[in-house]
Image (cartoon, rainbow, N blue to C red):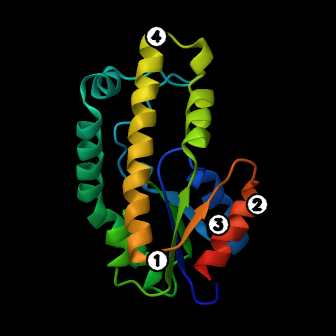
Amino acid sequence: MRGVRVVLIGGTSNTGKSTVAGAVAERLGFEHRSTDLLARHPGRPWRTPEREVPPHVAEHYATLSLDELIDSVLAHYARLWPRIEELIAEHAEHADAPGLVLEGSALWPERVAALDAPRTAAVWLTADEAVVRARIRAGGRYDEASGQERFLMDKFLARSVRYQSLVLDVVERLGLARVDVGTDRSVSEVADAVLAQAS
């Protein structure tokens, strides 16, 4: 990792990007940021103890087809990219800036590969569909959810799986680094693998 000032961790929802990025940042003594905090799109469509599903989020997943959901999120990430690129450059190009671990689904592989940013490494996390499904259903308490809530979660899952397929196609075509999170790998093990790939 000598000389690396920015580590990018991409991948679809529920692959553990946030948790792994936090572990990597702690090990490196870097700042940890998420692209979700720059502008969220439009959020996860299930209730948590702290949050109800906003009506516009429920409508988004309920009314759009899978292709429309993918087009919508890809357009959002394209609009967000200049801000992401600026953030990466700020940390990569200035020696006095803190190191950065930036994670998020918005890290589209082709845009990252085309970056002209020194001291930057990128890795994408992938997970089997069963792993993504289990995590989404656990997060949304699927077994206790209503039929409509399950429908929204299933749409989010379908979008997440399709998005991962698109990302994986590009990662493999461009020969970029990726780490599969597996079914029983610990956060520490995945962080180790990310650091090895980023070195």
Report the amino acid beneath label 1: His
Question: Where is residue 135 drawn, in percent x and y?
Answer: 61, 36
| N-term-proximal mark, 4 vs 3 | 3
| N-term-proximal mark, 3 vs 1 | 3
Q: Nearer the viewer, mark 2 or mark 1?
A: 2
Look at mark 4 in the image and give the residue it sits on: 147
Separation of marks 2 and 4 at Cα, in angstroms: 37 Å
Look at mark 2 in the image and give the residue it sits on: 188
Tag 1: Cα neighbours inside 10 Å, few (<14), some, or many (≥20)?
many
Separation of marks 4 and 3 at Cα, in angstroms: 39 Å
Tag 3: Cα neighbours inside 10 Å, few (<14), some, or many (≥20)?
many
Q: Within the image, what quadrant is residue 151 found in?
A: top left
Q: Within the image, what quadrant is residue 108 found in?
A: bottom left
Q: What element carries label 1?
A: helix
Look at mark 1 in the image and give the residue it sits on: 91
Q: In which quarter of the image is the C terminus?
A: bottom right
Q: Is mark 2 on a helix, strand or loop?
A: helix
Mark 2 in CB contact with mark 4 (< 8 angstroms): no
Residue found 30% across the figure and 46% down from its top: 73
Residue 51 falls left or right of residue 43 = right
Question: Where is residue 33 drawn, in percent x and y?
Answer: 51, 59
Q: Which of marks 3 and 1 is in front?
A: 3
Look at mark 3 in the image and give the residue it sits on: 25
